[in-house]
Amino acid sequence: MKRMVLVIFLVSVMIISGCVQETPPATPGSGNPGGGTEPTATNMTSMTPPSNGEPLSVIHVQADRSLSPKECSDRGLGDRVIFIYSSTCPACKMTKPALLEAASETGKTVEEINLVTDSKELDELAILPYYIPTTIVDCEVLVGPKQKFEFRDIMEMM
């Protein structure tokens, strides 16, 4: 019995850890008492420069937020719906049908980026999500599972 409880516990931990990435520890002067970095551009650069030839600063996303018009245009995110997920993440599997249904109802196309296998596409966006699923709708970043109406409301404003 103890062995079965231990196995169930370990499997649960493995499933949950497949949906989140570790947040780096707080750095002195970071202004984030909860640890990690602020969800704003940092001094890290992307491999792919925008059309003006300047390298992009990587945006670390930890919570729902709006990208600035510059961040959005530099990455070509206007009028796009991008779903960043992992195939082993239960929350991603629950969120995907709601997103696809909302996209179908609003006539939008969803670009899917698997965090594990599509790293080149993620590098080109210069966006690093700390949690999955992360969905980018136009210039709005949605972190974590959402319901269909949340996706649809944002898509209707595009």
Image (cartoon, rainbow, N blue to C red):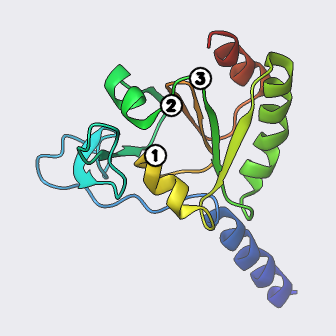
The mark total stands at 3
Task: Please give left or right for residue 107 compared with residue 55 in the image.
Answer: right
In the image, which disc is placed on residue 79?
3
Distance from the alpha carbon under mark 3 to that under mark 1: 14 Å
Q: Quadrant of residue 39?
A: top left
Task: Determine whether the residue tagged by mark 2 lies in a helix, strand or loop.
Answer: loop
Q: Amino acid at mark 2?
A: Leu
Please name the amino acid that badge 1 sits on: Leu
Query: How many residues crowd mark 3 within 10 Å: few (<14), some (14–19), many (20+)?
Result: some
Q: Earlier in the sequence, mark 3 or mark 1?
A: 3
Is the Cβ of the residue at disc 3 closer than 8 Å to that at disc 1?
Answer: no
- Counting from the top left corner in percent of width and height, residue 102 is at 80, 24
Residue 129 visible in rendering: no
Residue denoted by label 1:
125
Q: Which residue is mark 2?
A: 77
Front residue of 145 and 45: 45
| 41 w.r.t. 2: above or below | above
Q: Residue at x 55, y 24 (%)?
A: 138
Q: Residue 74's x, y, as percent? A: 36, 33
Quarter where residue 2 is shown: bottom right
Tell me which numbered mark, 2 or 1, is placed earlier along the sequence.
Answer: 2
**46 or 97: nearer the eye?**
46
Residue in the picture at 66% in, 70% down: 13
Where residue 113 appears, as percent x and y from the top left, is: 64, 52
Asked whether residue 84 appears in the rendered view, the answer is yes
